[in-house]
Image (spheres, rainbow, N blue to C red):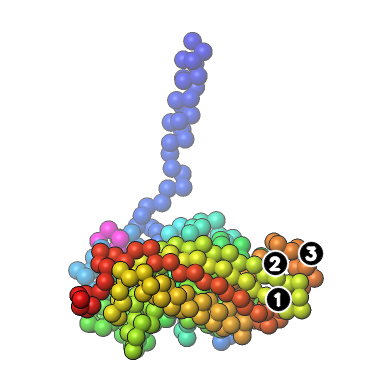
Amino acid sequence: MNRIRKIALIIPLLLFSSGCSNYTELNEISFILGLGIDWSEDSNYKVTLQIISPTDLSTGGTGGGGGNASPVFVYTSTGNTISAAIRDAAKKITRKKDFTHVALTVIGEKAARHGIEEIVDSIIREPRVSAFMSVLVAKDSTAENILNTLTPIKKVAAVAMVSKIQNVNFSLGESVNPNIFQLAENLAYTGKEIAISGVKITDNSKGKNNLTNIQKMTPSQTFIDDLAVFRNNKLIGWLDGRDIRAVLMVQDKIEQSNFSVPCGDNKFTSLRFLEQDIKTEVDVNGNVPVIKIKDILLSLVDETGCKIKLEDVSDLIKLEKEAAKVVKKQIVESIEHAQKYKSDVFGFGDIVHTSNPKKWKAIKNNWPEEFSKAKIDVKVTFIIKRTGLLGNPVNLKRE
């Protein structure tokens, strides 16, 4: 009987609670997929919102215009703060703004040089923002310009760039892409500087934001390239693709990549990265810090343009030694490039903080200088695990 009474009491509560008091029709919502933040000449923020309506989503991005309407709409607004600029956009947008689907934030180069603390703080205070939102820095451009580029295949620039980030990470290992909450966490570190992948436009000509752009054989489009390097949370310079790969290797975050190893007169063998065992130490007991890296890499042969007898152990060992030289050079040169900016994007300072807290307390305020003059000691062992379906290359004549 008690059970029946409980059920009788629960049913009316369920009936009353089943109504959706905060329900909103889909045709009353503007889904924001891309967010751009620039620093304007008037010393305030300019915000770009890349919006797609539910109607466009259901019709494949034609907007009901038979394929002649833009699949996305871009609105800009300004304000003394980012939140004020976003609110100002309400003057132009007829529907309620929905931030739950924001896939990407693009920070313009001027805004990044001005500083990203306020930008990150503003975004993560919005409870509707996804924790997995990606972040990129516009190189030689503005966030508005990047989000205004209508790209082929995936016409929504924000969605297209997120896919490109994933492709670059999987194929090349040349993208550093912290999500917005990881970026906020990194801002609190004292022994590691911020690093964010950059995005550029292949052709900045007129018409890149028109539907005619995607009808060209070689349309203007965005591409992921270079690494934005920060010091004290402000952009100070850029590193190139090979440097990005070295950063990921040292941090043991590289997924896949390949190395071109010279094996003759303008000839190369391509080795595909499989996995690594890397150990990094920073000796700060002397007058100058010493960065010590030991890396063991496993790979397979992707392609060979030289007449190397891969079935011959001695030839294989020679190739492994040459590959070790290539990797060592990339790591050393990448650290040296970061040292010129006095920006420890590798996180060596964090290693000191963990391994020697007392010493770190004494040098942390001067770590950019200490890092810039540190000595580098890198030892690489390269192991070719497999040579693919072939043994010796096809251009090697049988004896």
Q: Of marks 2 and 1, which one's residue comes earlier in the chain?
A: 1
**Between residues 393 and 53, which one lies in front from this camera angle?**
393
The residue at 42%/48% (across/down) is 23
Please name the amino acid that badge 2 sits on: Val
Quarter of the view holding residue 362? bottom right
**Which secondary structure, mark 1?**
loop
Residue 72 lies in the magenta stretch: no
Distance between the alpha carbons at the discs numbered 1 and 3: 15 Å
Are the residues flagged by discs 2 and 1 in contact, CB closer than 8 Å?
A: yes
Q: Quadrant of the C terminus?
A: bottom left
**Mark 1 neighbour density, 10 Å: few (under 14) some (14–19) many (20 or more):** some
Residue 293 lies, in percent from the top left, at 59, 70
Whether residue 183 is situated above or below residue 371 in the rendered picture: above
Residue 323 lies, in percent from the top left, at 43, 75
In the picture, the disc for residue 149 is none
In the picture, the disc for residue 289 is 1
Q: Of marks 1 and 3, which one's residue comes earlier in the chain?
A: 1
Q: Name the side, left or right, on which 42 lies relative to 370.
A: left
The residue at 62%/82% (across/down) is 339
Distance between the alpha carbons at the discs numbered 2 and 1: 10 Å
Distance between the alpha carbons at the discs numbered 3 and 2: 9 Å
Q: Which residues are magenta?
A: 55-59
Q: Main secondary structure of the magenta part?
A: helix
**Between residues 88 and 268, which one lies in front from this camera angle?**
268
Residue 211 lies, in percent from the top left, at 27, 78
Q: Which residue is mark 2?
A: 352
* Camera-nearest label, 2 or 1: 1
Please name the amino acid that badge 3 sits on: Lys
Q: Which residue is mark 3?
A: 358
Residue 48 visible in the snapshot: no
Q: Name the side, left or right, on which 41 lies relative to 316.
A: right
